[in-house]
Image (spheres, rainbow, N blue to C red):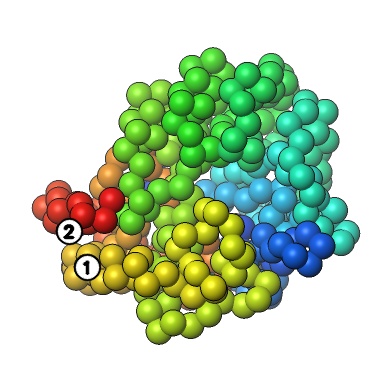
Amino acid sequence: MRRILGRSGIEVSGLGMGCWAIGGPYGNSGTEQFGWGEVDDEESTRALHRAFDLGVTFYDTASSYGAGHSEKVLGAAFRDRRDEVVIASKWGYTFDEQTRGAGGSDSSTAYLRSCLEGSLRRLGTDYVDLYQLHIGDLPVAEALDLAGTLEELVAAGTLRAYGWSTDDPAKAEAFAAQAPHCTAIQHDVSVLRDTPVMIAVCEASGQASINRGPLAMGLLSGKYHDRRQVAGNDVRRMDYAWMTYFKDGAGSPEWLAAIDGIRDVLTGGGRTLAQGALAWLWARSPATIPIPGFRTVAQVEENAGALAHGPLAPEEFAQVEKLLAATR
């Protein structure tokens, strides 16, 4: 399954791999965590290679994931086949690469340029296919102040295209309308949390809808129904306002109940629960490109296995919508 990355004309696999988790731990003063816990870089590399072997060509990371570590692992894994993969990264949050400490946001053009230089160094490449503004709540005027610099970087060949990671449809629409090489909006969406206004904006504006959180932070893997808890240095342990899928480090009961209500439909036709959740996103819109996270080869194999099943059939999609109507 192939899809076009918005109005850029760049062809990618219908499924991408989200590389947040393979960045490993990073945080701020021991009180906040922004990573997904410990990682094994050798396993991460094997998983990336396996994803490629299974047809995945799109990989999404960010300069701040693991304070640069995710980019290092991703770049090293594909250094010998750079022209065969499409790499997306993000900028906007500061960090200390040596201590893996997280800082605040910086929306200046100077930081845009310096952060990109760091990403190119860590990725071991001279261009990024898709560079995304990571500060989702930035005022539109400030985002548009960056468009001129982004256009210069596209003209120079350092970027092929750019986008914005935001959950605000109005911001996405305004930026896409005025920033010529904006081609993608990354936003939170899954079968549990549809975003009809944002998807409509993406479709109307010629933007790829890059689906962050397509497996609901892991709940749609099905493995959290046993009340297991995530590690202490996992972002899902934190009490952030947007962390609704997990509570006190375990899956939130109301979301787990919602999953149980649609499990039979999603797992029809031999799909696993995770594969069914990805199939729902493909059925939702031709613009969608889900980017589930991973830390192991096994997770990659399951997620990439969804490509063979393709989108939910129209009748399956309709049934899921009916079952979830009361919870949305």
- At horizontal 82% and vertical 28% (from top left) the residue drawn is 110
Q: Name the residue that disc number 1 marks.
A: 261
Q: Which mark is residue 323?
A: 2
Residue at the limit of the structure toward the right, as seen here: 98
**Which secondary structure lies at badge 1?**
helix
Percent across and percent down for residue 59 are 56, 51
Labels in figure, total: 2
**Which secondary structure lies at badge 2?**
helix
Q: Is residue 317 visible?
A: no
Earlier residue among tags 1 and 2: 1
The three-letter amino acid code for the residue at tag 1 is: Gly
Q: Nearer the viewer, residue 35 or 15?
A: 35
Residue 118, quarter of picture: top right
Q: Specify few, some or many for label 1: CA neighbours under 10 Å numbering under 14, 14-19, or 20 or more.
A: some
- At horizontal 60% and vertical 43% (from top left) the residue drawn is 88
**On screen, residue 318 above or below 151:** below
In the picture, measured across the screen, residue 197 lies left or right of residue 293, that is: left
Residue at the limit of the structure toward the left, as seen here: 315
In the picture, measured across the screen, residue 258 lies left or right of residue 160, that is: left
Q: Nearer the viewer, residue 226 or 68?
A: 226
- At horizontal 79% and vertical 49% (from top left) the residue drawn is 103
Percent across and percent down for residue 276 are 29, 62
Contact check, label 1 and label 2, Cβ < 8 Å: yes
Cα distance, mark 1 to mark 2?
7 Å
